Amino acid sequence: MRFDLTVPFARFAAQHISTLGTPFKRYHMGTVWRGENTQRGRYREFMQCDFDTIGTTSAISDLETVLVVHDLLAAIGIDKFTIRINDRRILSGILEVLGLTSKTTHVLRCLDKTGKIPRDTLAKELQEQGVSVPSIDRLLGLGELAGSATDVLNELQDLVGESVIGTRGVEAVRALLSGLSEVGVGDDRITLDPSIARGLDYYTGIVLESFLDELPDLGSVCSGGRYDNLAELYTKQSLPGVGASLGIDRLLAGLEELDKLTSVETPASIFLVYFDESHLGDYLRIAARLREHGLSVDFYPEPKKLGQQLKWAGKKGFQKGLVIGSEEFKLGTAQLKDLATQQSTNITWQGDLNLLADAIKNELRK
């Protein structure tokens, strides 16, 4: 009886990666089990929907994972939700500074209960693990840091000091927040929460949890993070991964309480080619706006050659490839390539993303 879908996926990817190719993206819905007491929105048997990218360390894949969570909840019709993010490396850096590296597993499991059990109970558990009172105050104070994301990041940088791994975590969160800002996802939906640890040991970088603002006690409805070492348990090859898991049963329980059960149409697939790093912000905005218009858009996480990306997209079953390079950005044009017939259609959009979306929809109707 599997307790999640991520570990089986890592094993499958390790076994078949030579056939699958990298980066490999997938989503999977299935039943999982947990040995815990049942309560509101929490069951021993439940459905999960996982979405993952494996085979790349690109920060774009971290960003895309958060955007999937954001767009998924928004598409369902949930107006008020918050995605809380952190990075396990920040916590590792703080533990390094406090001299608690040998207690990492136990301490992070305790921190993962922040907000779920009383502070005094957490402090007692940490004391039982041999953590000093000053260190306990420092650790439990992470969830009480206030101010803008920039202010909190600056405080975290001070806390990790000269720790290399901690500094990498701070920089990763800063880059993630910058990317989210590029596509218009800001503080109304994203919160930096340094106390988030995620209880599973396989997380190595960015971690996230998402909550319905009107039902905060329901718990996280979609959680995940980066797991760069998990697949290495089954192969000598490095297969870094990142993904998240939607708890379908818990989300449905929340939607039922909010009277927001609805259906969503499955649109066509568009592959956005990314090969000009200087226009990364533009690519992110294009993908985000096309998704707002109901188009299913995927985004290659690394700026590789055009032919290589289109070949990958064709194998994955995409209908159309959207090509916008440096020259196209200057002219306000784009090429929409049919990946089955290899025929291209020129689109003039002059920087108007709504116009671009309408033109793509018109082509898909033909």
Image (spheres, grey):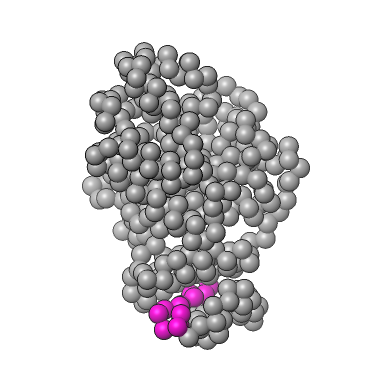
Residue drawn where x is 58% and y is 68% of the image: 290
Residue 300 falls in which quadrant of the image? bottom left
The single residue placed furthest to the right in the displayed view is 259
Question: As rendered, which of 123 and 261 lies closer to the eye?
Answer: 123
Spot occupied by residue 152 in the image (x, y as percentages of width and height): 43, 41
Question: As rendered, which of 175 and 247 lies closer to the eye?
Answer: 175
Magenta stretch contains residue 314: no
Q: Which residues are magenta?
A: 319-330
Q: Is residue 247 visible?
A: no
Magenta stretch contains residue 329: yes
Residue 269 falls in which quadrant of the image? bottom right
- The image quadrant where one finds the C terminus is bottom right
Residue drawn where x is 45% and y is 52% of the image: 177
Residue drawn where x is 52% and y is 19% of the image: 118
Q: Is residue 154 visible?
A: yes
Question: As rendered, which of 133 and 232 lies closer to the eye?
Answer: 133
Spot occupied by residue 57 in the image (x, y as percentages of width and height): 33, 54
Residue drawn where x is 48% and y is 86% of the image: 331
Q: Is residue 192 above or below residue 143?
A: below
Spot occupied by residue 271 in the image (x, y as percentages of width and height): 48, 70
Residue 11 falls in which quadrant of the image? top left
Spot occupied by residue 9 in the image (x, y as percentages of width and height): 41, 46
Q: Is residue 275 left or right of residue 1?
A: left
Q: Is residue 358 above or below residue 253?
A: below
